[in-house]
Image (tube, rainbow, N blue to C red):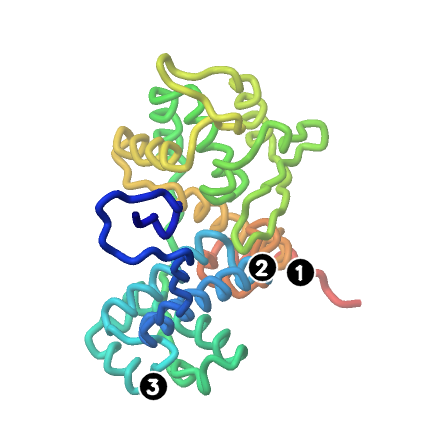
Amino acid sequence: MARSPVSGIALQGDPRPQSSSVPAPLTSPVRVPAAVEGDASLFVLIRRWQTFLEISGRCNDETRRQYRRYLLGFMADTMTDPRELTEDDVIEWARGTDHHGDMFGMTIRALRSFCRYAVDKGEMALDPTRHIQIKRRRRRPPARTPDADLDRLFTAAETIDPRARRTLELIFETGCRLGSIAAAMPEDVDLGSRRIYWRVAKFDDPYDSPLSDRAAWAAGELLELRDWHPARAKRRPTLVGVGPQRIYQWVQSSGELAGLHFWTHRLRHEFAHRVANDPQVPPFVASRLLNHHDTRLLDVYADPDEDLKRLAVANLRRRA
């Protein structure tokens, strides 16, 4: 009677010869094709690059996500491993794109960031984007919105949500970005010292802003409304209580009700236009209020009229 080679149990009618040894399992490793191994190492490199950007503070979460997206989009369009890119490959891809479009600029920035990292780590010999320049679009200074139009905008916001007008006025009075106002917490507001702390800011660079009389009123009103929320709607634990998409909708809807084309960042432009064209505000102070690292971006908003120029000259002191 034969026995099972694994369990030793007798098997009736089994014609196979009896064996007391258990068959050895297969020990030879499964071979992975070279192409698959290369793909795996590429994505490991991409993860390392993303981690480097995060730890080094080179860019914020949104920029890292965009870089990753545009790098993968380039790979999908060209079907090329970026480690094997040449300058001619990048130029050939660029021929079919709009050189002045946002996609071209973001793709080149993403490629340049990845390739420089890969060169530094010995994964590439040369950066194929090193000689490719991104043409900057000429920006016209945004026209300042008349006070009457702003009053209509804020009045319209009052009809949408009790928090909407306060939120829009706080953005207008501080020049904060959408992500900053959406992430602000109640404890970030200090009405005693009339300041607000922006814990989320561009380039992962938190900062604080002084509060004008109107800004202090708006922040105080939002604190009073911290427990309010519409029926059948949940409230976030933030100062405003809603996310960035809802705030964007508030601004857009308020503009439509007021007969204006408005978006969230335009409120920041209004603030920047005022501080950049005020002779009483030094450029260095204006750049810090906008959380800029230097004064170059003030040129986008600087558009002084004749009255401002005359006022600036009139305030100059004579040398002794």
Residues 309 and 105: in front is 105
* Residue at x 37% of width, y 33% of height: 148
Q: Amino acid at mark 1?
A: Leu
112 horizontally vs 96: left or right: right
Q: Is residue 138 visible?
A: no
Assess whether mark 1 and mark 2 are in contact (beta carbons under 8 angstroms).
Answer: no
The vertical placement of 114 against 292, above or below, is below
Residues 279 and 126: in front is 126
Residue 95 position, x and y percent, is 22, 79
Residue 191 position, x and y percent, is 67, 27
The vertical placement of 307 against 211, above or below, is below
Q: Amino acid at mark 3?
A: Glu
**Numbered tag placed on residue 57 in the rendering:** 2
The vertical placement of 242 against 37, above or below, is above
* Local SS, label 2: loop
The vertical placement of 123 against 156, above or below, is below
Q: Amino acid at mark 2?
A: Gly
Q: CA distance from mark 3 to mark 1?
A: 53 Å
Q: CA distance from mark 2 to mark 3?
A: 28 Å
Q: Residue furthest left?
A: 96
**Numbered tag placed on residue 87 in the rendering:** 3
* Residue at x 32% of width, y 40% of height: 262
Residue 229 position, x and y percent, is 43, 17
Callout in the foreground (2, 1):
2
Q: Earlier in the sequence, mark 3 or mark 1?
A: 3
